[in-house]
Amino acid sequence: MCRPMSRPALAYIVGAFEHPTRDAGDKTLAQLQADVALGALADAGLGKDDVDGFFCGPDAPGTGPLSIADYLNLDLRHVDTTNTSGSSYLLHVAHAAQAIAAGKCNVALITLAGRPRTEGRGKGGLVRRDDPNQPDFQWEQPFGMQILNMYGMTAMRHMHLYGTTSEQLAWIKVAASHHAQHNERAYARDVVTVEDVINSPMVADPLHRLDCCVVTDGGGALVVTRPEIARSLKRPLVKVIGTGERPQHQQGGYFEITQSGAAWSGKTAFEQAGVRPADIKYVSLYDSFTITVLLQLEDLGFCAKGEGGRFVMDGNLISGVGRLPFNTDGGGLCNNHPGNRGGMTKIIEAVRQVRGEAHPAVQVANCDLALANGIGGQLGVRHASGTLILERE
Amino acid sequence: MNERVFIEPQPSAETEAFWHAAGEGRFLVKRCTACGKAHWYPRSHCPFCASADTVWEEASGEGVIYSYSVMRRAKPPYVMAYVTLAEGPTMMTNIVDCDPDGLSIGDAVTLRFVTTAEGAALPMFAPKAAAGVVDPAEERP
């Protein structure tokens, strides 16, 4: 690896916690928020009174960050409720690092919790349809726009342009399932084959049921802090060395839906980190659908545009088998998708890998450099990509 | 077969003219008179040069399928699509009056208004062959 030795320290992720629940009918959203917040702080060796910055998405019930700050009785001087849907939490880490560098806070707490399974949301993949003030509402909702068909159209066009096949997409689910078998909390632990995926019911051409992520309750949280505090704690040091973000949309009607925002967010993050895709030992990629992973692999530069289908074949994403292990917790395709927002759990598994604390069956040897990427919103219409590059110090 | 229920479009002050014309069978797009470019979805400010000089113009109703996805589990199933209009921009729509298994990206399609329960006319598209429109170029002896 050839990179500058004097790269400025951004910030460190010192606490990470994933809620064990997948079905939280017995808990309130506020309880889940508290569980994950206190879990991440305990993991870091910090207490809630150490927190002076709070970051959350609209999954936190109430008025922005205020209701949960009130519930937890946090004493804050910095808040951020950036919302790019499922990728919000990758942006929160980046914004926390910036706030820490600017002296706006010392210990940033980032939370996510949701109960889509209990509340019966997410199964149909309906896009929020309750606000006619959304300028796009009347041009999309009457036509039956759903999350499923936006990703379906993206996959269909990728197949048309590059010859990608359903079998190739299926390899992504197969790899996730190989990892999930080792995760006792994973919602779907059965190892599946390419045939299982392509023989599962077609839901939105060309996506099958097993091309889609699971719907689960749960949550997660992270604690980000400045170097001096991180070094005073007892956890392995996970340094945030590169971040990037990129909203992508229909551009007035002239767009290419097979190009995700990861092409921009990744470039920014790699340039800041001073590393290249070939240096990365492990990737967490938001796997709302198999096609989401494929586009991120291409757009982040792990393979050439259009080569994603060939790249993922034959177990290339399976830890211990392939060249680029991904989502070793089983990801959204198998493990969980708390709040229908998969960005948080992508970061948590990347932290585990960099710390060397992933399940021994999937831990990547000498995993000193990892990347986490999220696509929030919907590929095919409007989304934001967030990229984080993490290094063990 | 179940009747499809559409979400009503709820026209705004910015778009009343579009939906009024659609009700009369005319399909409008917005074009900027400053930079000359047509855009989709229609809005008052040009998304390219930011000029407020945007005007409605009647579009040809001709286009090609940019991408599509058949919603198999909807009742009844429908074909979500993006269609690239002859005027330039690509719009979200549905392909109707078609065999969903016979569609391909790049297929020529033509406008077909579909009416909602409350009477709004939604601009959708049908394959040109199914619409009974014969391309003169293909009409060779």
Image (cartoon, coloured by chain):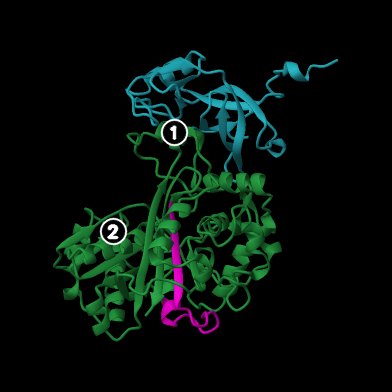
Location of mark 1 (residue): A252
Q: Residue A90 sits in which quadrant?
A: bottom left
Left or right: A64 as drawn, with respect to A390: left
Type of amino acid under label 2:
Ala
Q: Is residue A377 above or below residue B29?
A: below
- Residue A319 found in image quarter: bottom right
**Helix, strand or loop at mark 2:** loop
Position of residue B11 measured from the top left corner of the image (x, y, whole percent): 37, 25
Residue at 46% over, 35% down: A140
Measured as percent of width and height from the top left, residue A222 is found at 32, 70
Mark 2 and 1 residues: CB-CB less than 8 Å, in contact? no
Image quarter (top left, top right, bottom left or bottom right) of the C terminus of chain A: bottom left
Point out the stretch of residues depicted in magenta.
Answer: A352-376
Vertical position of residue A236 compared to residue A1: above or below: below
Q: Is residue A255 above or below residue A337?
A: above
Q: Residue furthest right?
A: B141
Comparing marks 2 and 1, which lies closer to the viewer?
1
At a point 59% along the width and 36% down the height, the residue shown is B66
Q: Residues within 10 Å of mark 1 (few under 14, many from 20)?
A: some
Identify residue for label 2.
A60
Question: Which label sits on residue B22?
Answer: none
Mark nearer the N terminus (2 vs 1): 2
Q: Based on the displayed image, in which of its 4 quarters is residue A62 positioned?
A: bottom left
Q: Secondary structure at mark 1?
A: helix
Instruction: Report the chain shown in cyan.
Output: B
**Circle 1: residue type:** Gly
Q: Is A44 in the magenta?
A: no
Residue drawn at x 24%, y 57% as measured from the top left: A80
Residue A193 visible at all: yes
Chain A visual colour: green
Q: Nearer the viewer, residue A181 or B119?
A: A181
Label 2 marks a residue whose chain is: A
